[in-house]
Amino acid sequence: MIAKRHIKLAVLLALVMAASTPRALAASPAEITAQRKEALEGILHRDTDYTVAAERWTCAMGKEPAMVSDERRQGAAFFPDAADACVAVLTRTARDRHLPDLYGRLLTELGGAPSEQDGLPQAIGTAALSGRGQVAIGNGKMMTVSPAVAFDAGFTIGYLERGAKAPGSADPEQLKRLSQNCLAGTAAFGACYSAGYMYGAKAAGG
C-alpha cells in the first residue's frame, strides 16, 4: 500500500543492518524505540510529499491505528504509534504549506464546491465543537464529521492560528491516548478537534 511506504522506507536501512546479526529476530525495546524514532524522523525530513500526503489521508480516514496494529502483528514492531505518526505527518505537511490540500480532495470526492476549501477546516471545527455531526460543503452536499477528520481540522486551525485561542495544556500521555482514540474513531469529535488544535499550536510554536 502506498500509504505505508514512507515508514517502510524510513526504516529500511535500519532493518537491513539489523538483519545481518542474530538479534534481528528479537529486537530489544530500546532498538524498537530507536527504529520508531527513525521512522518519525523520516516523515519529518526525508519522505516525499506524495507519501506524506498519502499517509495523511490514511490518518484522516481513521485507518492508521488498524494499519499499525496489523503491521505489528506481522512482526513490524518498528511502526510508530498512530498518534505519533499522524502528528508527524501533519507537522511536515504544515511546514511544507500543504495543510489545505486534504480539504480540496475531500470536496472533490464528496462532490462539494471547490470554493469551500479554505473555510472547510474551520467549518468542521465549528460543527465538532457544537456537537453537530455534519457540515455543509457546497453544491447542496453535506459532509459527516468523523473524529479523525475533526482531529486533522483541529491541527490545521491550531497551526494556522498559531494557537491564538489559547488551547491550554494537557498531560502529554493523556493527550496522546485521546488522539489514538480520535484516529481510531472512538472519541467525541469535539474533543478530537481540541486535541488536534493543541498539537497544531505546539507545532506552530516550533
Image: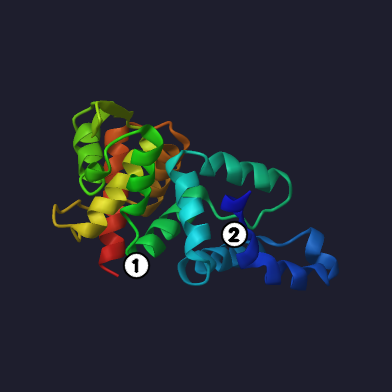
Residue at the image position 31 percent from the left and 63 percent from the top: 203
Residue, far right: 22
Label 2 crowd bin: few (<14), some (14–19), many (20+), radius 10 Å: many
- Taking depth in this image into account, of 159 and 137 the one nearest to the observer is 137
- Taking depth in this image into account, of 139 and 24 the one nearest to the observer is 139
The answer to whether 78 appears left or right of 21 in the picture is left
Q: Mark 2 or mark 1: which comes first in sequence?
A: 2
Q: Secondary structure at mark 1?
A: helix
Q: Quadrant of residue 98?
A: bottom left
Residue at the image position 64 percent from the left and 58 percent from the top: 78
- Taking depth in this image into account, of 75 and 29 the one nearest to the observer is 75
Q: Amino acid at mark 2?
A: Ile
Residue at the image position 73 percent from the left and 46 percent from the top: 74
Q: Is residue 191 visible?
A: yes
User: Can you tell which mark lies on residue 150?
Assistant: none
The answer to whether 79 appears left or right of 184 in the picture is right
Are the residues tagged 2 and 1 within 8 Å (C-beta)? no
61 up-or-down from 175: above or below:
above
Measured from the top left, where is residue 150 in percent x and y? 32, 40
68 up-or-down from 140: above or below:
below
Label 1 crowd bin: few (<14), some (14–19), many (20+), radius 10 Å: few
Q: Secondary structure at mark 2?
A: helix
Measured from the top left, where is residue 123 in percent x and y? 21, 39
Q: Is residue 170 visible?
A: no
User: Can you tell which mark lies on residue 7?
Assistant: 2
The CA distance from mark 2 to mark 1 is: 19 Å
Which residue in the protein does label 1 denote? 95
Q: Amino acid at mark 1?
A: Arg
